[in-house]
Image (cartoon, rainbow, N blue to C red):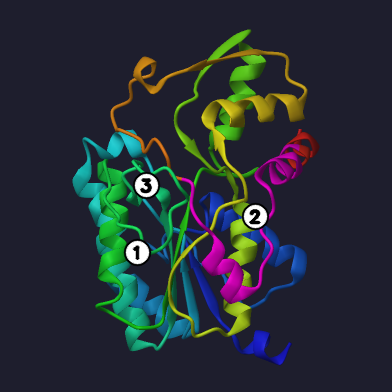
Amino acid sequence: MLARKMKRVIVFGASGQLGQCFKKIAGNNNLDFLIFPTENEANILDVAGLESVFARHEPTHVINCAAYTAVDKAEDDEETASLVNKTGVENLGRLCFTYKTTLIQVSTDFVFAGDKTKPLTEDDEAAPINVYGQTKLDGELVIPGLLGHYFILRTAWLYSEFGNNFVKTMLKLGAERDLLKVISDQVGTPTYAMDLADAIINIITSDSKEYGIYHYSNEGVASWYDFSKAIFDLSATEVKVLPVPTSEYVTRAVRPAYSVMDKAKIKRIFNIEIPYWRDSLAICIDKLKQQN
């Protein structure tokens, strides 16, 4: 417990989906080493403001949950996406180096092209096929040149009872419509943001020096169609769901067809068990029912 008390962990992007998960975990477990500055205090593009936050708290770790995540909008707003996903990371990285702080950067499966057919490892080539994925990769690539103490966690298909996400959208649409068409040829793994937050806390409290890139999603494989079917099954929502190919659902940004990630590295290094995606989905849906 002494080691925990000595830690000071600043969470940037605390009002977003993952940031709210950290707040929930902190409240449930009395983790007083987690610090949640306000949006005004912790704008990752405001260097002077960031310097003030770092000087006040002298963090041992920083978790960067702040990101530009509007995948389709990014295609027409590359400048803003790059500012948040690359320049903001640079700003944090420089201050982390100055204060000898370990940076934990949350990244995405969208750094991959999606043309593989077996789970992607941390050593597989990153080749984004949309602006969002490229800006997130750009953010990853600036980190090693700025500091040596960092963990980059790539995750996928994130959802929770907080913020806007696929689960909440499907539940809303399922309550309004009798029929939905959902893409069946994009495959990945739904990830409960509370599980990801737990994994990051595990990394911090382990005091590990095994820095680098890690993959984290829930276990298992699903298409968006499988995911939506599970959402409706577990929530007892009566709605007909039809599988459709990507070609029938054109979006501004191209999505990876396959982005299942290999989690062997994070499981081995940190000795963690990762929940199966449908089990975690059931937990999230139960919590959403309790909220309502």
Identity, as a three-letter code, of the amino acid under mark 2: Met
Q: Residue at x 37, y 47 (%)?
A: 110
| Mark 3 element type | helix
At x 69%, y 24%, the residue is 232
Question: Marks 3/2: CA distance?
Answer: 20 Å
- The magenta segment is 260-285
Would you say the magenta stretch is mainly helix, strand or loop?
Answer: helix
The image quarter in which residue 50 lies: bottom left
Q: Which-is-in-front pick, marks 1 and 3?
A: 3
Of residues 194 and 38, which is closer to you in this image? Answer: 194
As measured in the structure, the alpha-carbon distance from the residue carrying label 2 to the one carrying label 1 is 23 Å
**Residue 43 visible:** yes
Q: Which mark is residue 194?
A: 2
Q: Residue at x 36, y 42 (%)?
A: 114
Q: Would you name the residue on which mark 1 appears? A: 44
**Residue picked out by circle 3:** 110
> Depth-wise, is mark 2 or mark 1 nearer the camera?
2
